[in-house]
Image (cartoon, rainbow, N blue to C red):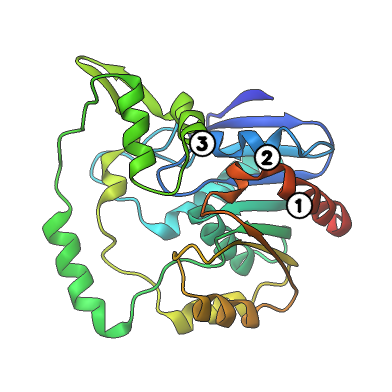
Amino acid sequence: MTPLFLDGPGLAGLRWQNGDIPVLALHGWLDNANSFLPLGEQLDALDLVALDFPGHGQSRPRPAGCRYLFDDYVFDVLAAADALGWERFHLLGHSLGGAVSSLVAAACPNRVIAMALIEGLGPLTTPIDQTVNAWRRAIERSKPRSRRVHPDRASAIQARVASGDLGQAEAECLAERGLTEVDGGFCWSHDKRLTWPSPHRYTEPQILELLAAIEAPVLNIYADPVSGILSRASIERRLAALRRKHLLVHPGGHHLHMQHPGALAPAIKEFFHEHHI
């Protein structure tokens, strides 16, 4: 594994260049490329590039005055593929990364060969009758806030553990790329604008239309029990919209690719090999 920086799009990442099957790995919200460290070490025979999204990890933040709008990540991914010289490629996405992958595949069927999505088939949606409320909430809460400084590295990691389904080992893994030492202690270095509410989201019918347009085969990996990011009914509707779907369910939480890499890696590797053209 070697560090990577794509100067054009300003994106950092990690690369496991152990084969000729190109795979872009896209992490979840407020995570970073290190979320694929446990899995990447077991995905041999691939040319795997795990990116830091803008404002995450070691990638450049968006310019001052800009927001982190979901659609812009699609263009970040395409810019990264162009910088790598990849006309066609596979996608491996977790959570936000899976949602972004879904739109890339729908919008660019000529470029995406196949996708493995971990808890990430399409983005979160908002009912149409919540449109005004979403805008008002975004205006009210999109304000600069001071960054929380933790007295030591251990307390910063523990705060991340307390905020989600991550265990100690997984949080420490993310911390290697996501913690910065500052006066008074340590802070998580992601751009604070990432926590601002979105002023608008797609509706569920729009997402179902996008998913139905995906031509690439999709390996959908979900935690058992359902992690709660999407309801079981929503997952079933979205799976039904796909043309070419495969399903893998494994005990674990939302970050099950970090928790159980040995169980997932063989299926992911076999899937990319089977569908590589």
Q: Would you identify the image quadrant in which residue 271 lies?
A: bottom right
- Circle 3: is it few (<14), some (14-19), or many (20+) Cα within 10 Å? many
Q: Are marks 1 and 2 in contact (CB under 8 Å)?
A: yes
**Is residue 49 toward the left or the right of residue 17 in the image?**
left
Q: Earlier in the sequence, mark 3 or mark 2?
A: 2
Q: Position of residue 48 (x, y in %)?
A: 71, 38
Residue 97 is labelled as: none
Q: Position of residue 203 (x, y in %)?
A: 40, 79
Residue 170 is labelled as: 3
Query: Which of the pair 54/83 is nearer the observer?
Result: 54
Q: Position of residue 227 (x, y in %)?
A: 49, 62
Q: Earlier in the sequence, mark 3 or mark 1?
A: 3
Q: Which SS class for mark 3?
A: helix
Nearest-to-viewer mark from 3 and 1? 3
Q: Residue at x 47, y 84 (%)?
A: 205
**Is residue 274 toward the left or the right of residue 108 in the image?**
right
Q: Amino acid at mark 1?
A: Ile
